[in-house]
Amino acid sequence: MWNPDQYDRFKDERRQPFRDLLALVELRPKMRVADLGCGTGEMTRELHDHLKAAETLGVDNSETMLLKTSAFGDEMLRFERGEIEAFVASRPFDLIFSNAALHWVPDHRGLFTRFAGLLTPHGQLAVQMPANDDHPSHATAAEVARESFGIAPRADHLLAPESYASLLHHLGFKRQHVRVQVYAHELESRDSVVEWVRGTLLTDYQQRLGSRFEEFLEAYRTKLMARLSDATPFFYTYKRILIWASF
């Protein structure tokens, strides 16, 4: 259900959290890097070049997204299809990086434990995840799903920020940085919020509802518009968790 064109409608807005996460990563020579949830590969290319990495592997489960990666790969930057929760490697990585992907994956305690085991002795972990479920743009979708369509809201797999800090300490990371950041976006209008979430959050409901999705979208739009200011431009706040850690 991932549509690269829909997702990229707000490419510039999505790039800042990626760059903020990248800024947390320590530059080290000849790094071997894994980018989990790489999408179209455009940001993976920037990651690879910024780090001057020796080798970078991008992994994503969307064949549609991966079709775009041919424009960004080369001998030292390659892409493959795979599920993050099933990711394994024959050799350890110096950095496991994941931008706006792990919130789709369950069991973060088990997931982070496995990632720790895939890192070199001085390896780094860098993760950014949306944490905006309490915003009307997300809460309204959950309400419409539950009350009007009788399906469960999209699963929320996130831990509390302090739980990530404790988990990283338990896993043996010597240094860490965990923060919640609110990103401020000026969108053309409140209608743009619907277009934003159509590229991300609503893909879950589209996949589960199939032919009923257009009905869901209309109900969602009607209820959401009544809850958002009609000011233009529309000020959209978006919370995210940024995590960095190193052994």
Image: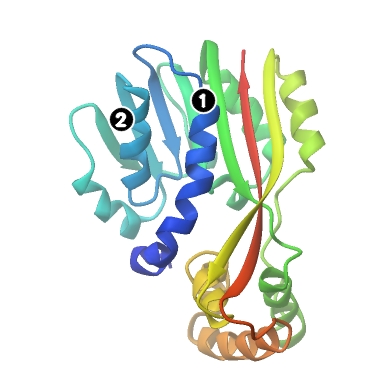
- Residue 33, quarter of picture: top left
Question: Relative to residue 93, is residue 103 drawn left or right?
Answer: right
Q: In the rendered image, is residue 211 in sight? A: yes
Q: Which residue is mark 2?
A: 49
Q: CA distance from mark 2 to mark 1?
A: 13 Å
Q: Which residue is mark 1?
A: 25
Q: Position of residue 78 (x, y in %)?
A: 27, 35
Q: Are marks 2 and 1 in contact (CB under 8 Å)?
A: no
Report the quarter where the N terminus lies.
bottom left
Q: Residue at x 80, y 27 (%)?
A: 166
The amino acid sitting under disc 2 is: Asp
Question: Relative to residue 14, is residue 29 drawn left or right?
Answer: left
The amino acid sitting under disc 1 is: Val
Numbered disc 2: secondary structure? helix
Judge by depth and name the residue closer to the eye, 166 or 226: 226
Count of marks, rendered view: 2
Q: In the rendered image, is residue 173 in sight? A: no
